[in-house]
Amino acid sequence: MAAAATLALAAGARAQTTLLTPSPEGPVEVEADHIVYQWEAQIIRLEGHVVVRRAGGILRAGSGTMDRAHGILKLEGGVLGVQERQVFLADSAVVDLNARSADLGKAVLFLKTQPANPNAPRAGANALTLHGDHVRQLPGGGYAAEHVRLTPCDCVAEPDYELLADTAELEGDRVHLHGVDLRFLRATIPLFPLSLPLTSRQWGLLAPQFAFGPSFGFTLLQPVFVPLGDANDITVTPGFYTGGKPDPRGEAPGTRAIKGPRLGLEWRYAPVAGTAGWVTFDLYDDLDQHESKAHDAAFPGERGTSGGRGFGGVRGVAHYNHRSEGEPGVLALEGALVSDAMAGRDPFPNALESAQDFLRTDAGAWRARGPLTVGLDATFLQDVRLDATASDRRLFGPERRTPTQRLPAAFVQLAPMPLGPAAFELEASAVQFDRLAGPDVQERTTGWSPTDNFASGRPTLPYDGSRAPALRLDLSPRVRFSAPRSVPVDLRMELGARADSWIVEGFSDRSRSRVYALAGAQASLPLERSFGALLHRIEPAVTVRALSRPLQSGGPPFGDLTDAGGPSFASAPDAAQQGLAIADGTLIGVPAARRAYDEVDFAAPVSGAVEAVASLSQSLWGKAGHTAGRVFQFDLSQDALLWAQGAKARLGEGTAGVGLQVGPATIGGTLRYDWKLRDLSTLSGSVGVRDSRGDEVHGGISFLRGASSERLRGGIDELFSAARFAVAPGPLTGSGGAGFSAGLPFNFRLIYDFVHTFNTLETQENFRHSMLLSYETPCHCAALQFSIRFSFHDAHLLGLPQWGILIDLKTLGAFSY
């Protein structure tokens, strides 16, 4: 009675009581403007600004009653609840304090991305918003709801899309839906039952993936995401290729049918700070493997390919990437592997890897301390080039080819360091080139690998023409000078040398050493003058680079750009054949023994060279408004070969480039003229207008002559190659096109492009029309795209149009076809 009287005296004032029986989770604290306690019935009546706290959770309501005997709390007058990341609003709530459950009437549940602030519960981003006619909080802390509207869109206005469900169960960071429909763009689409992760680290089904292709037909993939702790996860993606229609005319990539089950695997990891990586496998069991017949080798003594594809029909592609950075240094790995030469080409003939001759894996470890860097690296190559008799060649086992590998290499780099008025830098390396197995019979006999371009019909060499294991040692010191800033001419000079030594295992007569000097100078005179709000800048410049003839000993050069081809080496700067694709009998080519081991770093020519480039650059700059930035640019340059042993001095290519930007409009173009050919070698141009909304109109052309003159970069020590290749220049080939992008009413956008390709075969497209219609929802959490592409040769449509549909629900994933 005393307690009841005390509580009654508190009417109209802030009151608090802890008279409720404590629970294992702690006591229940209740505040209200007016609290009345009925002692015998053990009922507490709460009026005005009711606040209930328990174990970090908080409830607010207008009024309520608490049955202390049965542990039941009833709240009315608008209920607000906050518990960790959960925030809910309801008309009323019945809370069972003993069972830790609650029934909510006409409730809205917000699941926050971060723990909610009880003093500002609506603040912060929402990972989920759920509306339900009847919501019940389960004893385990989850929720069960009926007649549900759910969306992960955190929109101020109406959400871009909603999932409608008969029932929903929210358990931790996952929601299970039954009787599901998708309401998007005022349309209702029936779906299957869903179990959706509400954070990026929850296991479950991801959005299914659809695709269509000429070789595999239709494919459906269903990714399953499985976290393995906070720093590891895997995604398992089973699927199936239904199979395309094979082309009976050949076995070219994209024309062969494949079908069967497929499996994608992805492992991602980031165990410690500074270390992260991933590994992916795309595997499939090709049920059309019987279409590939066995082929005998084209060269006696070589091994052909057995029937079928892959290893018992199992084929696939692997990609991997790793990087660790820390106090000891950096460790990095990146690369790709395939089971057979067509494993990646068959399902994805237009992928970049399908056009490459080699797949590579690069690994390296290095440490930098101040200007000094030391490290190790290696490159592993898979020869995926195709030949007519071995399109399904396996890349492991006896059918594999044996390209030369760049095995562990040690290197030292010293960044430019002050040395009086100059700067000194140094590079040094030791690289081992080797094979994982011996060379093929054809390469030893002719100097040409079976997968080399135009390898068939090569004459027999009087020596072993294959590449042997070799060790290359390099040392390159350089000194750079720059004129003081007080001098009006920007003058820079460079002096240095490079020493190479090749030690060839088993062929001591091929071992070679050389040393040569290099020198360079660049002078430019930047001039500027203002014209009101415009600044005109003009800068004439001259660059000269000289490479001496090397002091050398031992066998013939490796990878010399002036190599004239044939069984023995001869330098021919005006008719070189190094690196050419031999297309006719007039060219004899360079045997593998004399080609560059490292395809990235060719050797400087034994002819030596003095080369020069003269340029004139002009630009007009604006200060503000529509003319802010560079308004106009006009560049001229001319390169020349001044001297090379065995070659005539000549002009190379003259280049002119222009660019103009006025407000939203841009115009640009480049023209290069080959003085030796007396014809254009490159022609390109573009024009466009773009506004702030992204609407634009554009057009352009691009033409290139197959073999112009000098602009094939042959080595790290040259501005351009001193060699001129002994091939016909060929015609100008290229394409031209135009297109536009325009915003449409109701957030739609239309993108159209037209491309015309010149000088194509009758079976190839020379006209292409493509269109993309996209829709971006107002809240930007969903998008819709429809694309279609038509391929023509003149007026004839080549095949059926290629089309695709993409529904991107962003948070939930994308559905495409």
Image (tube, helix red, strand yellow):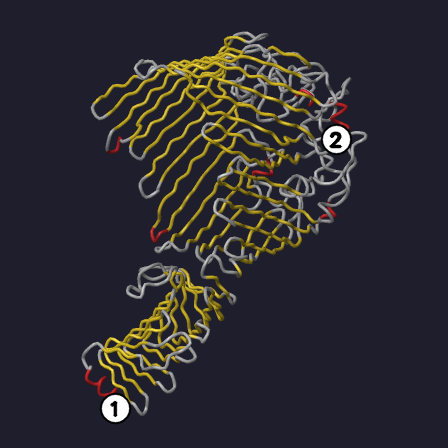
Q: Is residue 5 left or right of residue 548?
A: left
The residue at which mark 1 appears reads as 1
Is residue 521 placed above or below 331 in the rendered structure? above
Circle 1: residue type: Met
- Neighbor class of circle 1 (other Cα within 10 Å; few <14, some 14-19, many 20+) is few
Visible residue check, residue 540: no
The answer to which of 676 and 264 lies nearer the viewer is 264
* Dots 1, 2 in contact, CB < 8 A: no
The answer to which of 769 and 715 lies nearer the viewer is 715
In the rendered image, residue 684, in percent from the top left (x then y), is placed at 44, 26
In the rendered image, residue 509, in percent from the top left (x then y), is placed at 72, 16
Residue visible at 47% across and 14% down in the picture: 495
Is residue 699 placed above or below 199 in the rendered structure? above
The residue at which mark 2 appears reads as 438
Which comes sooner in the sequence, label 1 or label 2? 1
Question: In which quadrant of the rendered view does residue 95 lie?
Answer: bottom left
The answer to which of 126 and 724 lies nearer the viewer is 126
The answer to which of 69 and 794 lies nearer the viewer is 69
Is residue 107 placed above or below 70 in the rendered structure? above
Looking at the rendered image, the disc whose residue lies closer to the viewer, 1 or 2, is 1
Circle 2: residue type: Gly
SS label for mark 1 = loop
